[in-house]
Amino acid sequence: MKIMFISDIHGSLPALQMALGHFERKQGDLIVILGDELYHGPRNPLPEGYDPKTVAALLNDYREKILAVRGNCDSEVDQMMLSFPMMADYSRLYVDGISFFLTHGHLYDPEHLPPLASGEVFVYGHYHVPVTKEENGIFYINPNSISLPKQGTASYGWYENGIYRLFDLKTDQKLDEMTLKRSEG
């Protein structure tokens, strides 16, 4: 299965269009959105190409390929615009014997983890900073914000055949890579 991980769209149409272009070109199967789909929030600047209504319509075109969780900027009115569920605080995904815990990062984060077993993958957004690391048997993935990165360039994550890769959103250059071992049990 080919999985794209994106986070913190914040209503940016050009950022979403670039991400979906990579998804189509790489023939992805699933898009995991780690929250903050439509609204930029009061602490963030207006992202380039802010157009939440068109972003919602474009995401709805992919509704059968999206698994999403709620971010701190997401609300019930956002859910009314989207035709896929996105109000859960977390979700779990099991692929290739690997367990992924998916959350935005404002409730659970690397300092406040949910119960996880060795070999599980903790996937989050919120911080607008990419993370690809393994520590104490847990894999940590943050694909970064596709619209408002705080460090470096906007990026997205890609999982395929047991390997997670981080790519630059604009150039599609590989920035990082990590092999995910299979969870026990």
Image (cartoon, rainbow, N blue to C red):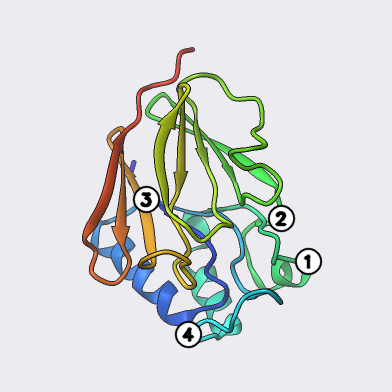
Q: Residue at x 48, y 87 (%)?
A: 49
Determine the CA span between mark 3 and mark 4. 27 Å
Residue 151 location, quadrant: bottom left
Residue 57 location, quadrant: bottom right
Determine the CA span between mark 1 and mark 2. 8 Å
**Circle 1 residues within 10 Å: few <14, some 14–19, many ≥20:** few
Query: Looking at the picture, how far across and down is residue 27, in whole percent?
Result: 27, 56
**Mark number, residue 76:** 1
Q: Residue at x 46, y 55 (%)?
A: 65
Question: Along the polypeptide, which appears first: circle 1 or circle 3?
Answer: 3
Question: Along the polypeptide, which appears first: circle 1 or circle 2?
Answer: 1
Q: Secondary structure at mark 3?
A: loop
Q: Residue at x 61, y 65 (%)?
A: 36
**Circle 3 residues within 10 Å: few <14, some 14–19, many ≥20:** some
Residue, disc 2: 87
Question: Along the polypeptide, which appears first: circle 2 or circle 4?
Answer: 4
Q: Secondary structure at mark 4?
A: loop
